[in-house]
Amino acid sequence: MAELPEAAEPLLFGAVPPMAIVSASMLVLIAIMIWKKVPSLITGGLDKQIVAIREQLDEAKALRAEAEKMRADYAARISNAEKDAEAMLAHARREAELIISRATSETAEVIARREKMAGEKIAAAEHAAVEDLRKRAVSAAAAAAGQLIAARHGLDADRAMINGTIANLVN
């Protein structure tokens, strides 16, 4: 086999190979970055972002804790409101039952009083009717007796009766 001629590598200014130029350029670039404090700027920016993210996480934790506290507070309020509503309903039922029982007893008392008053009025009316009837009977009897006496007794009979009554009074 025939030997191939060695490939010639291009050189800068005839002496420096391109790989050395690239390496030197990288070293110069890294040195400039270090001199201008680029890594500290990058880490400072990252640190600021880390601090901002931590603040956001802390704020989110605080908001979550506050939301859970509010949820628990509202759950307690709802529970208390339900208990209050049940208590109010039970109280209203007791009051309604009390009012109904009072109304029933008062109605019975009113009916009893009215029955008593009606009985008293009836008794008074009966008494008045009896008294009126007695007065009429007395008047009728007196009139009838007066008529009988006037018809049966004359002047002589009256004198004998008066004298007999006076004699009875003296004795």
Image (spheres, rainbow, N blue to C red):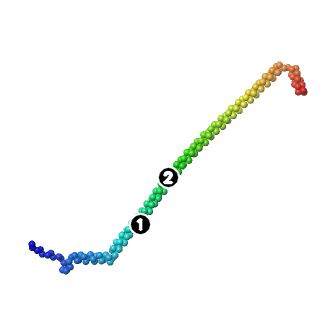
Query: Residue 3 occupies which quadrant of the picture?
Result: bottom left
Kindly identify the amino acid type of the residue bearing the numbered disc 1. Glu
Query: Residue 158 occupies which quadrant of the picture?
Result: top right
In the image, is 114 to the left or to the right of 23? right
157 is higher (above) or lower (below) than 27: above
Residue 70 image label: none
49 is higher (above) or lower (below) than 67: below
Which residue is under mark 1? 55
Image location (x, y in percent) of residue 57:
40, 64
Q: Residue at x 45, y 60 (%)?
A: 66
Q: Can residue 155 be seen in this view?
A: no
Image location (x, y in percent) of residue 92:
55, 46
Viewer-side residue, 67 vs 127: 67
Which residue is under mark 2? 79
Query: Residue 160 occupies which quadrant of the picture?
Result: top right
**Label 1 vs label 2: CA separation?**
35 Å
